[in-house]
Image (cartoon, rainbow, N blue to C red):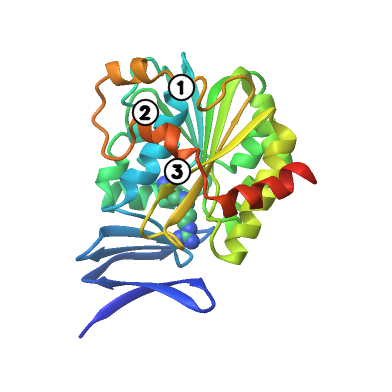
Amino acid sequence: MELWFSELHTPNVKLSVKVDKQLYSGQSEFQRIDVFQSPEFGRFLVLDGYVMLTEKDEFIYHEMIVHVPMAVHPGVKKVLVIGAGDGGVIRELTKYPEIEHIDLVEIDEQVVQVCREFLPRTSCKLDDDRVHICYEDGLKFVRFKENEYDLIIVDSTDPFGPGEGLFTKEFYGNCYKALKEDGIMVNQHESPFYEADATACMRAHKRIVESFPISRVYQAHIPTYPSGHWLFGFASKKYHPVHDLDAERWLERELDTLYYTPKLHEGAFCLPAYVEKLLRKVEVHG
Ligand code: AG3
């Protein structure tokens, strides 16, 4: 008997992954949570039917969402991470000794429990002394923060279901306020390829452009996400993602990465012409 997991990437396209066995299935207060074991991608986490991470390709997403801002900002001490209950972002952040405090705000405690049990490769640093976990809606948490963080990482799900509020104008405005005067916000920015994703992507970009003086988009190749071509947003009050990249300082750290390099960092901000066009549409006609 063959067992396959499928995610619909559009009503006409799906990605199917052969499964050895289902390790967990449960319904939390917020969403359905599944963990599978597969021959090609190792273990993978699915929320409401959407693949959040696989053991084989999660390094790409987590390295790109963390090391890009960390190689730009010269002194990150306090970080706010929203979503990210799987711990992948935390694992990468804890590689930086100068970070003193990380607030991890995850709406769904059950996601953290399940990841601690079944996905130790990403959840391995959740008990680091600097990490403070708060089970709350990120949208609400950030409302009451002012001038507090050097870096905010928004590791959300897609913009429907529990993650919807993390793509709103109100949320980005509150992130701006919660950041110090040289703060950076990075968010997962969906894919530009399929129409529904591209629409979400443009909507998010428009709102971020309206909220931050510097707003750039960068890309990575993530095989298990829709189309495999994924974007991230870099929004900032002061630092430019490429002009303020300090490659030497980052290389001196001798961090062991599998995807991120400062050279790739620069290249990641060079987008295909059709993506530039999509983004320019909302920048110009704001
Ligand atoms: N969060 C973004 C996942 C988006 C994937 N979308 C999809 N499969 N349709 C990933 C969380 C990793 N920490």
Kindly check if marks 1 and 2 are in contact, taking CB atoms under 8 A apart as contact.
yes
| Label 3: element kind | loop
Residue type at mark 3? Answer: Ala
| Label 2: element kind | helix
Q: Nearer the viewer, mark 2 or mark 3?
A: 2
Q: Within 10 angstroms of label 2, few (less than 14), some, or many (20 or more) residues? A: some
Q: In the current view of this chain or complex, which residue is farthest to the right? A: 285
The answer to whether residue 250 is left or right of residue 232 is left
Which quarter of the figure has residue 263?
top left
Kindly check if marks 3 and 1 are in contact, taking CB atoms under 8 A apart as contact.
no
Q: Nearer the viewer, residue 222 or 66?
A: 222
Question: In the rendered structure, which disc, 3 or 1, sits on the residue that comes first in sequence?
Answer: 3
Q: Which residue is mark 2?
A: 262
Q: Alpha-carbon distance for marks 1 and 2?
A: 8 Å
Q: Which residue is mark 3?
A: 84
| Label 1: element kind | loop
Task: Please identify the quadrant where the N terminus is shown.
Answer: bottom left
Residue 255: percent from the left, percent from the top? 26, 26
Residue 225: percent from the left, percent from the top? 43, 59
Q: Is residue 165 visible?
A: no
